[in-house]
Image (tube, rainbow, N blue to C red):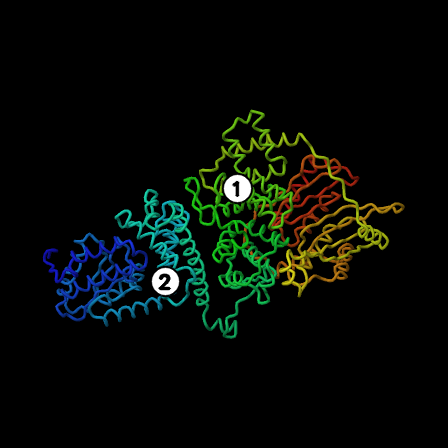
Amino acid sequence: MTSTDVTEETEGSGPGGYAAARLRLLTEGARSGPPRRRALAELTDDWLAGLFGAGTGGHAGVSLVAVGGYGRGELSPRSDLDLLLLHDGRDDKAVAALADRLWYPVWDLGLDLDHSVRTPQQARKTAAEDLKVQLGLLDARHLAGDLGLTTALRTAVLADWRNQAPKRLPELRDLCAERAERQGELRFLLEPDLKEARGGLRDATALRAVAASWLADAPREGLAEARRRLLDVRDALHLATGRATDRLALQEQDQVAAELGLLDADALLRQVYEAARVISYAGDVTWREVGRVLRSRSVRPRLRAMMNGGKPAAERSPLAEGVVEQDGEVVLARTARPERDPVLPLRAAAAAAQAGLPLSLHAVRRLAATARPLPTPWPAEAREQLVTLLGSGRPTVQVWEALEAEGLVTRLLPDWERVRCRPQRNAVHLWTVDRHLIETAVRAAGFTRRVHRPDLLLVAALLHDIGKGWPGDHSVAGETIARDVATRIGFDHADAAVLATLVRHHLLLVETATRRDLDDPATVRAVADAVRTEHTLELLHALTEADALATGPAAWSSWRGSLVADLVKRVAGVLAGDPQPEAEAAAPTAEQERLAVEAFRTGGPVLALRAQTEPPADAAAADASSADGPEPLGVELLIAVPDQAGVLPAVAGVLAMHRLTVRTAELRSLPLPDGVDGSVLLLDWRVAAQYGSLPQAARLRADLVRALDGTLDIAGRLAERDAAHPRRRGVEPPPPRVTVAPAASRLATVIEVRAQDAPGLLFRLGRALEAAGVRVRSAHVSTLGANAVDAFYVTRGEGSPLPREDAASVARELEESLRG
């Protein structure tokens, strides 16, 4: 049978009438988006129903069913028609003739057609064998014929899907992952496939299928709108090209943007990326929930009843104040009060990233809905938690995206809005501006052992391209923004100036190294004048490499790295030619002198605890916190003890036993007042409780006395605790690094340690230094986010600096002790 044998009953039901009506609909300027897609589907429904009615001759037991996108009533201008001719199997010859009467008119119009002819049993069997067929049938919609036949099939298919969900959902998840690997992430591609790329229309359809299984559901807020946006863009793309394409090619983007009434192609891509971000995040949350449900179902009911009395109880392990782990996610503790704890969002995010766990959707939404804004400037803990989050490596990405999905990032950093989902039309760049900034922080986290101030490196990584949201040179604009942000989040004036310099000159080293003559003294002097200090140069070197590695494989190579390293070496030489005088030790306070005299008189340790608080930034914050007083920042711990061996590991070990986090620590020898022979070691530390309240000073002193006289086995106690409660293995941090600082002091050898902060770290370092047979003249310990940056001024027994070979040996021993 040919198409000419098909009789047109009416102008409206025939190909010509339908084609004219279709053309009018697609060229109407007043109708677009969902209304046009629905109208096109309805028009097509009427035409196909007319063709079906003319060809059935009153035959029962057959129906025409729309499936897939057409089943959802979503027809783009060049969409194919997914049709199923369903029959009861009683008259195959009549059904075949009817199929010809339906398919040929569609082909005659040049429309793409995906068609099948099956009985209900055949349809279910095919669906059981082919996941894509089953997904299409989930959207089955009756068009014409035997309604009961269609309804029965739809009911049976949904029942099959729900019964087989534990088996089919992992298959669907793998299908989505394989497609994402092949097509890439829609929100980072300059020529994305709106349907197949991750975060595209296929993923949105997969989320509908998960919801239909009743096992889990996607976070619905914003999902329908994101899907609508992508469909609108595809409609405009079909009209612009006249083809059934889903790839948004560069040459079509301006025309598509104009069709949608957008300013330009960048505005178009940003809208596409925003939609893809919503769908991708919804997919992450949904598949995580599917995995959780399937794991819980895999435990046999009888075993679960034996273990939990018939009620499964998820364990809750503390991660930080107000933050716990439950069932593989980070959630808020039952006692958490986000409305009174403005640091909680950052604390929860940092804890999740450090543990390598996702933030639960419920936790993020509760934080977004109830958490108080941070005061300006931020309290010290908030800044430290941000640094910890940024320094957590790869897990930072998923945690940051969770915060972004609920608007918490732009609430914390308003300037982020201008770079969010902003495209970069440069083939070298793999990412949008916002994701590039996070990727740079991920890379910078691997370089924190190379710099004295890892906190400044990580924040500079986050902000180095923040000026791309503004007109003009992004480095110049970024310098102003970075200084403002640094001040707002609580860095002092000097640190804010360093951050501004890093952002302003983040391209200086690589551009100079690759574009200028390094043998020209003026080249090196210009870089030296820009960075001004060796520490800033050190930070800029690490930032340069992190930025390039986060850009893409074409932005960094061993050749570029060697050129930059050569430039840095030359600039460091220029900067070292103007040495700064060593700072004199600060004079002791009256309280420190009092403690020192008391320690010398009693022959034992004397300590004092003093809480440190930070006043609210404004009256509104003061009113909100008046019931509980100012927010505690930690406790200053002053300890004076007669000069003797083993003080550093003893104090550090006792604090670790009591679960106290050391934020900063100073140790120095304090001469006694005139007329008193001898010296006392003074320790001025700032500590905070990991969980709960601080221990009493009397108990700390009692344990310290026992530690110093050798009756308290600190190492054994810490080992027992670690064995009973092993730490979760989350982020794999960079290896520790121990170096000897050249020419840092004329009176002592300076050993610098950069390592991942952990309970007992300072105790282990103190023991290692004692075992090396050196005397710690002074120590300067600080914790910057998750990084410990410690400097120990050590001497030989008689008080002279270590010979170079001995110093290198001590550094190696310390590094080996940390790696062990």
Q: Is residue 337 visible?
A: yes
- Which residue is at a point 50% across and 58% down the rendered structure image? 358
Residue that mark 2 sits on:
208
Q: Amino acid at mark 2?
A: Arg
In the image, residue 211 sits, relative to residue 793, either above or below, namely below
Residue 27: percent from left, percent from top: 25, 52
| Frontmost residue, 481 versus 664 | 481
The residues tagged by marks 1 and 2 sit, at their Cα atoms, a distance apart of: 43 Å
Q: Quadrant of the N terminus?
A: bottom left
Q: Secondary structure at mark 2?
A: helix
| Residue 477, numbered label | 1
Q: Amino acid at mark 1?
A: Ala
* Left or right of residue 347: residue 764: right
| Frontmost residue, 286 versus 529 | 529
Mark 1 neighbour density, 10 Å: few (under 14) some (14–19) many (20 or more): some
Q: Secondary structure at mark 1?
A: helix
Mark 2 neighbour density, 10 Å: few (under 14) some (14–19) many (20 or more): some
Residue 206: percent from left, percent from top: 36, 59
The image quarter containing residue 689 is: bottom right
Residue 694: percent from left, percent from top: 70, 61
| Residue 314, numbered label | none
Residue 87: percent from left, percent from top: 19, 67
